[in-house]
Amino acid sequence: MADPSSYRPRPGEIPDSPGVYRFRDEHRRVIYVGKAKSLRQRLANYFQDLANLHPRTRTMVTTAASVEWTVVSTEVEALQLEYSWIKEYDPRFNVKYRDDKSYPYLAVTMNEEFPRVQVMRGQKKKGVRYFGPYGHAWAIRDTVDLLLRVFPVRTCSAGVFKNAARTGRPCLLGYIGKCSAPCVGRITPDDHWDLADEFCDFMAGRTGTYLRRLERQMAEAAEEMEYERAARLRDDIGALKKAMEKSAVVLADATDADLIAVAEDELEAAVQIFHVRGGRVRGQRGWVTDKVEEITTGALVEHALQQLYGEESGDAVPKEVLVPALPDPVEPVQQWLTERRGSGVSLRIPQRGDKKALMETVQRNAQQALVLHKTKRASDLTTRSRALEEIAEALDLDSAPLRIECYDISHLQGDDVVASMVVFEDGLARKSEYRRFQIKGFEGQDDVRSMHEVITRRFRRYLAEKEKTGEWANGEDLTDGDRPTTGADTTENGADTTENGAAATENRAASTHGPALADEPALTDGPALKDDDGRPKRFAYPPQLVVVDGGQPQVAAAQRALDDLGIDDIAVCGLAKRLEEVWLPREDDPVVLPRTSEGLYLLQRVRDEAHRFAITYQRAKRAKRFRSSPLDDVPGLGETRKQALIKHFGSVKKLRSATIDQICEVPGIGRKTAETVAVALAGATPAGPAVNTATGEIMDDDDGAPETTADAPGEPVSAGTPDERRGQER
C-alpha cells in the first residue's frame, strides 16, 4: 500500500486548466482515468487526509504509485480523451458498463453490391445500417418475414447467393416472391440497392409514405378492375401494419429519442436504455456496472453516454436524449453529442407528459434488472469465493489464490509438441491472458522436460520485467537470447473467433525462443514491453498459484524451474486425471479433495481449459504441417504460380516426373524457375499415398486424389482407427 504523499506533485506543478489525468500503480498499469475542468483543483482533492476520502477513493490512491496528466484546450476534448483512454487502458477503478447479454440487431449490409438483411451481434461494421437492439432474434426474423412481402430484399448468405448464380436457379424465397432474386438477374444492382434503401427508411420510422403510396396503388388497381393486384397490395398493407404493431406507439408526436434510466445502490448500478424512433420503441438494452469509484448519478449517466455514442455518428445519435440526471457540467457533453450527430442534440430531464411516463417505465426496468443481477451474482460470488478458500486451505496458502495459471503439454506421439497457459482471475477465465508455446529446446516426447522449459520461459520473462522496472535489482543476468522482445498484444476481443462467435485470439499468443515458424507470424513468448504506456504486458504479473496438468513428475519439474530462477513466493500444484488427486512439490502423498468440493471443481475447470487450449493449438499446427507442399520450399515461387503448376500437371507427383521443358510450358514459369522447381522436387522425399479415412482405401494419385503433402482435404491416416488416433493425442 503506497502513501499518496510519496507521489504527490509539488505545489504549483499542476496546471489550472482543463485536462485528463491518469493514476498508475507500481507496475505502471493505468488504474484510473479522470477528466477535470481544472486539473489543479481536482487532483488536490485526492491528496487530502485519507480519513476524509470515500473508501473506494482511498483504496485507489493507496494502490496508485504515480499520477500524470495531459492538458487540453476545451472540456469537450477532455471528454473525448477520457473516453479513448478508458477504452484503451481498461482501468480497474473506473466505471465500466458491461452488457448483461449480447443483443441482436437487424442489419442491412449497404456496403455490398447486393445488400443483405440479416441478424447481427457484436461490434458494428462500417457501411452496415443497424436497427435495434432487439430483445430476441426471433422478433427480428418475424418482422423481416412480414416486410419481405413489400421489400423483397436479399436475405441469403454469400454461399447460397453464389450457388444460385452458378446454377441459374433462385432459392425458395425467390420462387414465393419474398426475394427479388438478384442472384439470377431478375433485378439490377441499382434497383435492388434502392429497394434495400426503402427497407431502411421504413425501419427508421418513415412508414406513412409507403402506406399511403400502397393504398393509392390499391385504389387505382381496383378502379381498373385489376382485382388480383389490388388484393396483393391489400395484403402488403396488412403485413406492414402488422409489423408496425409489433412496436407500440409510446410517443404520439413521432419523436426520435433515447431514454436512459439508472438504478443504483452503494455497490452496483444498472442502466436501461429505450431506443424510440418515430414514436415507437425500436430497441432496448441494459448494462450493469460495479461502482468501483465514488460517483454520482449524473456521472453514471455521462459514462453511459460515452459508451453508447462513443463509436456512433449521424442518425445513430438521436435528436433528443432523456436522462434521470444531468452530468456536471452538462454543456461539454451536449456539445460532444452535437458533434457526433452533426446537428443539435437536446440532453434533458423529462418533466411532464408522455415522456416522463415513459421514463418511469424505463426506470422500473432498470430497477428490475439490478435486482435480477444481484440475485444471480450473489450465488456466483459465494460459490467462487468458497472454491478459492477451499483451495487455499487444502494447499496451506496464506491467502486465496486470486490469480491462477495452469499449464498443459500436448503432442501427437512426440510430434508438434506445444504447451498452453490459461489464466483464471477471481475464479473466472481471463482469456485475454492466455498464451501458447512451442517446445523448441529438444525433440521428441518428454512431458516433464517440456513442462520445465515452459515454466522457465514464462517466469524468466516475469523476472526480466521486474528487472526492467527496478523491482529485481539483484536479478540474474539474462542472455540476449532470453531477453524479452516486443510483440503484438494479444486480446480475446480484438479478433474474430471466440467460442461464442465474437472475437478472439485463442491462437494469437506467445510463441517460442528462436525464429518463428515459416507459416506463422513472428510472435514471441516475451512481454510486449512498451515503456510508460500502461497497457497490459504479456508476462508481467505473477500468479499466486501455478497448476500443472499432471502428477508428481510434472509438479517436481515446475517447482525445479521456479527454484532455478530463485522464485519462492509462488505456490505449485498438479492435478492428475486418473483419480483427480492434487499433488504438491516434495510430497509423497497427494491431497485428496472431496468430489463435491467447489475447490476441486474449480481446479478441474482450470485444468480442462488448459487442455482444450493446448490440444486446439496442437491440432492446428498438425493440420498446417500436413497441408504443406514441396513447392513451399522453392525460393521465389509464389502462391499464384504454385497453383498454376498444380493445375497444369494435376498433382505434385506428375510435376516431379515432368521435364524442365514441360515445366516451362506453364504460363508465368521461365526456364530458371523451372530448373529451380525441378531441383527442389528432385531433392524432396516423395510422399506416401493418401488414405481414405472412412474406408481405409489407398487412393492412387492418378485417380485424381491429391498427394498428402499437397493441399489435401484431409489428413493422411497412420495406423489405427480414428478413435485410437485420438487416444494418442496429449
Image (spheres, rainbow, N blue to C red):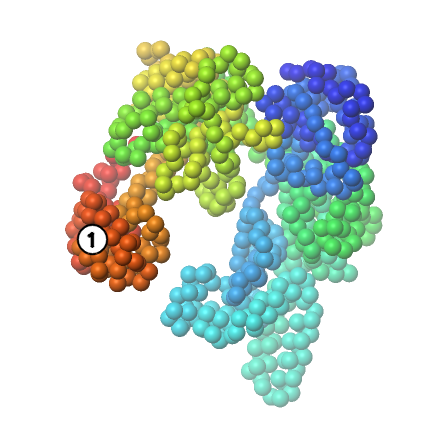
Give the quadrant of the N terminus.
top right
Q: Is residue 215 visible?
A: yes
In what quadrant of the picture does the C terminus appear?
A: top left
Asked if residue 7 is positioned above or below residue 379 in the image, the reply reads above
Answer above or below: position of 436 versus 323. Answer: above
Q: Which residue is mark 1?
A: 656
Front one among 247 and 208:
208
Residue 57: x, y in percent? 71, 24
Q: Nearer the viewer, residue 656 or 551?
A: 656
Q: Position of residue 689 (x, y in %)?
A: 18, 49
In the rendered image, the residue lying farthest to the bottom is 224
Q: Position of residue 379 (x, y in %)?
A: 55, 29
Q: In this rendering, is residue 693 above or below 575?
A: below
Q: Amino acid at mark 1?
A: Arg
679 lies left or right of 167: left
- The residue at the point 79 percent across, 29 percent down is 15
- Element type at marker 1? helix
Q: Left or right: 115 with respect to 717?
A: right
Q: Residue furthest front?
A: 672
Q: Is residue 651 left or right of residue 530?
A: left
